[in-house]
Image (cartoon, rainbow, N blue to C red):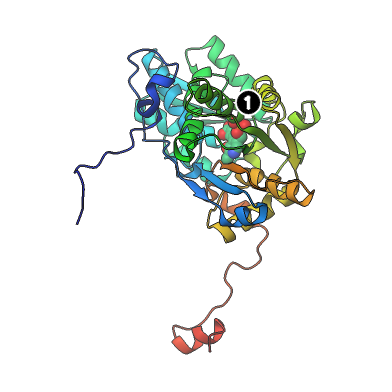
Amino acid sequence: MTSGPWPRRQWLGVIEEYRDLLELPAGLEAVTLREGGTPLVHSEWLTGLTGGQVWLKVEANNPTGSFKDRGMTAAISVARHEGAQAVVCASTGNTSASMAAYAAKAGLKPLVLIPEGKIAAGKMAQAVVHGAQIIMVRGNFDHCLDLARGLARDYPVALVNSVNPVRLQGQKTASFEIVDFLGDAPDYHLLPVGNAGNIAAYWLGYQQYAELGRASRKPVMRGFQAEGAAPLVTGEPFPDPETKATAIRVGNPASWHLAEMAAKESEGRFAAVSDAQILAAQVELARRDGVFVEPASAAGVAGMLAELAAGQSYAGKTVVITVTGHGLKDTATALESFGDIVDNVVDADVEAAAAAAGLA
Ligand code: AN7
């Protein structure tokens, strides 16, 4: 039995939910898969470790399994509004998965540029099944982004990477949702950083809510990169970025300047975590909080654990950690550290299963 009004109100997607706060063309018709409205999950584990209140913004719960859908609804809506027939992006995987889905919904032709050999299988499957044309580039993500920019400059195809400022308009809604839920901005916001669009967008959103009086404060922003792809930490581009967290394998982030501004203005910073720390955090988060994220998405949690080990404190503070994408995107990397997946093989017999499970 249901109670209350029927039909219940469905979440409308980030454009309709926040339209008056987004800089988008007047009268824009939204191409939406009802992205956003993602859960803020309380982490008893990290709350216990820190003595603060730690929340996970679980962006896996977006239609294509990553935070990219927030910006993509905006970018694809505007591309269609402006009469584009085709859209292009460079991607480490999630942007292309998202673009392909939204392009399909909008009836646009999606063209994906990916770096050689390093895209997680789940993300490739998404792009392929949604009908994208996949062009693999002999080079890394940064080369792909240069190419995408060149194609959009010289040919009739719209660029939907986060260098397109419309993307950030959609992505900043994650900050709005956090403040709407918590009642104010958190003290700290931690997240993984690759091409740096997301940290820039979060900061935009927090600033806007503070200016509107919807939040009384702005959080300290802390961004975490993989050691092998940590240009914002070292201050120098990485010509050959390398990490198992392929989503953040970016050597020269497009939103470098905006990300540095976010860290500086919020009195935050960037730090690097090793692949081993990232993969350990991924497994611990899955086992303690029940949240399965892809490797890159665990960088914020890995960063917090590294900080705690180094004696830093979040006691008494409210902390949000964005986990950016779903664990099912990249099961191969997730399973690498495990030996046999199957622990026992038994006949279809209760006694045998009980004995194998140690119950008997
Ligand atoms: C799971 O898909 O850049 O710092 O091309 O997929 O905003 O780049 C993905 C990035 C974090 C980093 N976590 O965000 C792409 C792409 C996941 C990601 C990031 C990405 P940005």
The amino acid beneath tag 1 is Cys
* Residue named by callout 1: 144
The answer to whether 198 appears left or right of 305 in the picture is left
Q: Quadrant of ligand 1?
A: top right
Instruction: Tell me if residue 258 can be seen.
Output: yes
Q: Could you tell me which residue is drawn at 74 percent across and 29 percent down?
A: 232
Q: Is residue 17 above or below residue 295?
A: above
Q: Is residue 152 above or below residue 8?
A: above
Q: Could you tell me which residue is drawn at 54 percent across and 37 percent down?
A: 94
Q: Could you tell me which residue is drawn at 54 percent across and 29 percent down?
A: 216
Q: Position of residue 187 (x, y in %)?
A: 61, 37
Q: Position of residue 98 (x, y in %)?
A: 47, 34
Q: Number of callouts in the render?
A: 1
Q: Position of residue 194 (x, y in %)?
A: 65, 33
Instruction: Tell me if residue 92 can be seen.
Output: no
**Image quadrant assignment for residue 13:** top left
* Label 1 Cα crowd, 10 Å radius (few <14 / some 14-19 / many 20+): many
The answer to whether 84 appears left or right of 152 in the picture is left
The answer to which of 330 and 134 lies nearer the viewer is: 330
SS of the residue under disc 1: helix
Q: Position of residue 95 (x, y in %)?
A: 53, 32
The answer to whether 245 appears left or right of 121 in the picture is right
Q: Is mark 1 within 8 Å of ligand 1?
A: no
Q: Could you tell me which residue is drawn at 42 percent across and 27 percent down?
A: 73
User: Where the N terminus falls, by quadrant?
Assistant: bottom left
The answer to which of 246 and 13 lies nearer the viewer is: 13
